[in-house]
């Protein structure tokens, strides 16, 4: 039977019997309101179903009908600039978020069925095509060309292909296959819990440039890579995610607001459309899809939202785009998993999370990658998840398990945030595993060895941390001048380089070239200072406030498009120490 009756309702979870023909992961319609649910467990003819909508008013005896299909998204022109809930229902207005939900059971489609798009074929009649090959293009927004691909599972010879204005479900091509003619439209469906295929994964060897110095220079993320941003409440996770969404050199951004407070998503909605993409001069929404499941929305839809997001990301990847997905926060997603597992009365593992928490986290991050697409181009999905451990305790299960499966760990720190060191990414316990893969990219594009300088300054910062322990005990005066110089230079690194104001128009985004020039300038200041120390010049003179102040302020004083100012700044540093040396030489 594909029809059953509810036997039990427990919040977002219901149980129904009489569903002998249903399968696990089938989507079902619940009650005459046709609420959307998904079977997450089958025992005989009894199904446990998570319902993506409020279940109030639903009770035993109500009917449940399986659709026979897994939870899927619609893929095609019209997703960009949109905002969806966790199961891809369009949220048209702010009030949808603020509490006035979509009417329950309303099945407004993810893609508009009325709107027409101009389809320009790039393939021709009698071409042999396979799954993923490109049939034609639609100018979806002023900055993104949507490639219409042969659906997965279809291959054959093009018998007919059209040009002109079509709605997403009208036929644009007929493909003659072994099983007869297949009519193809611009609309495809894909089950969210299954990764979309590609030809193969390749090593990511290009950085995702975020314009954030501490990330790009010290803990870079690769295109097609994985990163976690753990941190306690208020430490700046959302600001970092927003900065990446706004400025990273990804073609497409999928922003999944997962279980965070409603007003955070309203901020995104108000702010993002106003933001101008520095690359295109257009609103960043033209390359963005927002997926919102705030804490006041049903918990099961939150569980689904990251899969919906990553499926959309893979689809754009398959067109040959570089896609960045932000998940804020994956902890809220894991909590949804925990709540549903609890209601299923599964045996809890650590802190009440189900035993399959690690495999679910791994399964999500495994969908990142830099790939050869089926159509023979390259594309990538980069996954960047915020993690919000209670009290900032990184030993809790979600943070620990996320750490196992990501290659970049950007640890946000309460102390740094309190002292207004933003972004509060702690350089002592953050890391990136991508440096060896990115080395060639740096060598080709930068004047100098960035990985080398990076290690030099990470080491110096670690040394500073040790010195600070001594300073706490006995004060700075007992340290030899070499070590006091280390403290002074590290202060320049922290204030002048690592701190970056997201709200300052010049500092909010900094290209990699400028980041490297800044670090090289600090290095020049350090090396000149060391030479001066050898001439027995006292640290109090070497550390010239005016000169150090200038270096600290270079982030504001040297605009992104004016990098030649670094030459005069470095000349000024050199001149200062040459003169100092001659003065001291004269005295001796
Ligand atoms: P979380 O998401 O971790 O709870 P938020 O991202 O909302 O924290 O950040 C909290 C506050 O910290 C922001 O509202 C902002 O005032 C400040 N902040 C965080 N990062 C920065 C930054 N890079 N530049 C300036 N201010 C920042
Ligand atoms: Mg936040």
Image: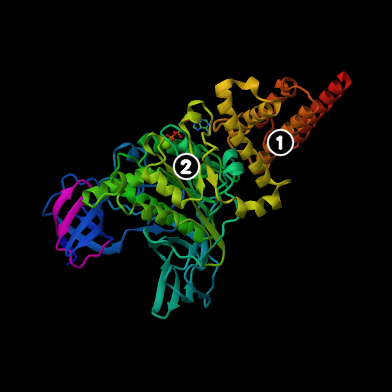
Quadrant of residue 399 within the rendered picture: top left
Residue 162: tell me if it is visible: yes
Q: Residue lying at the far right in this picture: please name it.
A: 586
Dot 2 alpha-carbon crowd within 10 angstroms: few under 14, some 14 to 19, many 20 or more: many
Answer whether residue 7 is magenta in the image.
Answer: yes
Residue 357 or residue 364, whichever sits in front:
357
Mark 1, residue position: 523
Query: Which residue is pictured at 88% across the width and 20% down the height?
Result: 586
Q: Quadrant of residue 216?
A: top right
Horizontal and vertical percent for residue 44? 17, 65
- The numbered dot on residue 378 is none
Which residue was labeled with disc 2?
229
Residue 273, visible in the rendered structure: no
Comes first in the chain, label 1 or label 2: 2
Magenta-highlighted residues: 5-24
| Location of the N terminus (image quadrant) | bottom left
* Residue 335 image offset from top left, x and y in percent: 32, 44
Element type where label 2 sits in the image = strand
Element class at badge 1: helix
Residue closest to the eye, 555 or 390 = 390
Residue situated in front as seen by the camera: 20 or 148 = 20
Q: Which of the two residues, 91 or 209, is positioned nearer the viewer here?
A: 209
Taking the image as shown, residue 440 lies to the left or right of residue 399, namely right
Q: Nearer the viewer, mark 1 or mark 2?
A: 1
Residue at the spot 16% in from the left edge and 49% down from the top edge = 9
**Residue at the top extreme of this rendering:** 587
Q: Is residue 471 left or right of residue 1?
A: right
- Write the residue at 67% across / 29% down: 483
């Amino acid at each position: 039977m594909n029809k059953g009756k509810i036997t039990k309702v427990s919040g977002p979870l219901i149980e129904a019997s009489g569903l002998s023909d249903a399968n696990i992961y089938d989507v079902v319609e619940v009650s005459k309101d046709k609420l959307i649910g998904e079977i997450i467990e089958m025992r005989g003819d009894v199904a446990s179903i998570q319902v993506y909508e409020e279940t109030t008013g639903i009770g035993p005896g109500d009917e449940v009908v399986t659709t026979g299909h897994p939870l899927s998204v619609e893929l095609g022109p019209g997703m960009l600039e949109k905002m969806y809930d966790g199961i891809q229902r369009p949220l048209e207005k702010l009030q949808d978020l603020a509490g006035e939900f979509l009417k329950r059971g309303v099945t407004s489609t993810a893609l508009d069925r009325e709107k027409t798009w101009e389809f320009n074929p790039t393939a021709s009649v009698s071409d042999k095509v396979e799954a993923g090959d490109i049939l034609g293009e639609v100018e979806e927004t002023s900055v993104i060309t949507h490639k219409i691909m042969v659906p997965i599972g279809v291959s054959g010879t093009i018998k007919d292909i059209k040009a002109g204005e079509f709605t997403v479900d009208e036929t644009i091509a007929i493909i003659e296959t072994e099983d007869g003619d297949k009519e193809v439209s611009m609309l495809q469906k894909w089950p969210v819990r299954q990764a979309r295929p590609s030809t193969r994964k390749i090593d990511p060897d290009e950085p995702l440039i975020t314009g954030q110095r501490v990330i790009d220079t010290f803990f870079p993320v690769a295109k097609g890579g994985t990163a976690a941003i753990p941190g306690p409440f208020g430490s700046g996770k959302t600001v970092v995610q927003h900065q990446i969404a706004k400025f990273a050199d990804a073609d497409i951004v999928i922003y999944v607001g997962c279980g965070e407070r409603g007003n955070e998503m309203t901020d995104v909605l108000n702010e993002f459309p106003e933001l101008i993409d520095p690359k295109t001069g257009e609103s960043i929404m033209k390359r963005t899809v927002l997926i919102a499941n705030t804490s006041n929305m049903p918990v099961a839809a939150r569980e689904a939202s990251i899969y919906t997001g990553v499926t959309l990301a893979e689809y754009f990847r398959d067109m040959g785009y570089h896609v960045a997905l932000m998940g804020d926060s994956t902890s809220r997603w894991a909590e949804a998993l925990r709540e549903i597992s609890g209601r299923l009365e599964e045996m809890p593992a650590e802190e009440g999370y189900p035993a399959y928490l690690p495999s679910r986290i791994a399964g999500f991050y495994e969908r990142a990658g830099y790939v050869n697409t089926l159509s023979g181009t390259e594309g990538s999905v980069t996954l960047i998840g915020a993690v919000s451990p209670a009290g900032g305790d990184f030993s809790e299960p979600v943070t620990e398990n996320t750490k196992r499966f990501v290659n970049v760990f950007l640890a946000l720190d309460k102390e740094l945030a309190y002292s207004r060191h933003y972004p509060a990414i702690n350089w002592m316990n953050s890391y990136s595993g991508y440096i060896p893969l990115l080395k060639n990219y740096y060598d080709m594009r930068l004047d100098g060895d960035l990985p080398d300088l990076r290690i030099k300054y990470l080491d110096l910062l670690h040394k500073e941390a040790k010195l600070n322990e001594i300073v706490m005990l006995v004060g700075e005066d007992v340290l030899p001048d070499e070590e006091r110089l280390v403290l002074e230079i590290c202060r320049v690194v922290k204030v002048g380089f690592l701190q970056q104001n997201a709200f300052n128009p010049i500092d909010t985004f900094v290209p990699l070239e400028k980041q490297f020039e800044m670090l090289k300038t600090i290095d020049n200041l350090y090396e000149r200072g060391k030479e001066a120390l050898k001439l027995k010049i006292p640290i109090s003179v070497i550390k010239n406030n005016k000169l150090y102040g200038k270096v600290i302020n270079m982030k504001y004083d040297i605009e992104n498009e004016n990098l030649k100012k670094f030459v005069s700044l470095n000349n000024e540093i050199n001149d200062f120490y040459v003169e100092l040396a001659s003065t001291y030489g004269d005295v001796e």
